[in-house]
Amino acid sequence: MGYSATVTFEAQGDAWIVTLRADLSRGETSQLFLSGDSMVSWPVEGLKKETNVGLERSAMFVSEIAARPEGLTIRYCEKGQAGRAVALLRMQLNQIGIQEVT
């Protein structure tokens, strides 16, 4: 069980992209769900509005992120905002016992 979190710059969209992927086996996903799946949240201030169509919330269950092949992608206007979002996501995942893999 692990996750990866990155911040990259997308020149064509002029946005800082936060990508979060959670790698859980089926057994780990089932165990997480049965033990009370945890939610992680991120700041909505500074979101790149026109590129976050469909992302109308500020939190998601870890099992839902793990089920998405592309993971969670959030676009911010500024690098500092994206950096704060990644720091917050890392802190929350570490608190629930999911470690970052490199």
Image (spheres, rainbow, N blue to C red):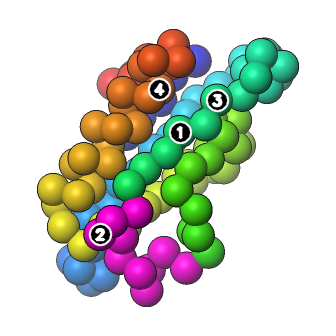
89 up-or-down from 33: above or below: below
Count of labels in the image: 4
Among the two numbered marks 4 and 2 on one chain, the one whose residue lies closer to the N terminus: 2
Q: Circles 3 and 4: CB distance less than 8 Å?
A: no
Query: At 23% across and 58% down in the image, what residue appears?
Result: 81
Q: Tag on residue 38?
A: 3
Q: Circles 1 and 4: CB distance less than 8 Å?
A: yes
**Pair 4/2: label in front:** 2
Q: Secondary structure at mark 1?
A: strand
Which residue lies under the disc numbered 4? 93
Start-end of magenta stretch: 44-53
User: Distance between the Cα atoms at labels 1 and 4?
Assistant: 7 Å
User: Distance between the Cα atoms at labels 3 and 4?
Assistant: 9 Å
Q: Tag on residue 46?
A: 2
Among the two numbered marks 3 and 2 on one chain, the one whose residue lies closer to the N terminus: 3
Among the two numbered marks 3 and 4 on one chain, the one whose residue lies closer to the N terminus: 3
Q: Quadrant of the N terminus?
A: top right
Q: Circles 1 and 3: CB distance less than 8 Å?
A: yes
Among the two numbered marks 1 and 2 on one chain, the one whose residue lies closer to the N terminus: 1
Disc 4: CA contacts within 10 A as few (<14), some (14-19) or many (>=20): some
The image quarter in which residue 10 lies? bottom left
Query: At 48% across and 75% down in the image, what residue appears?
Result: 52
Which residue lies under the disc numbered 1? 40
Is residue 71 something that shows in the picture? yes
- Going by the numbered disc 2, the residue's amino acid type is Gly
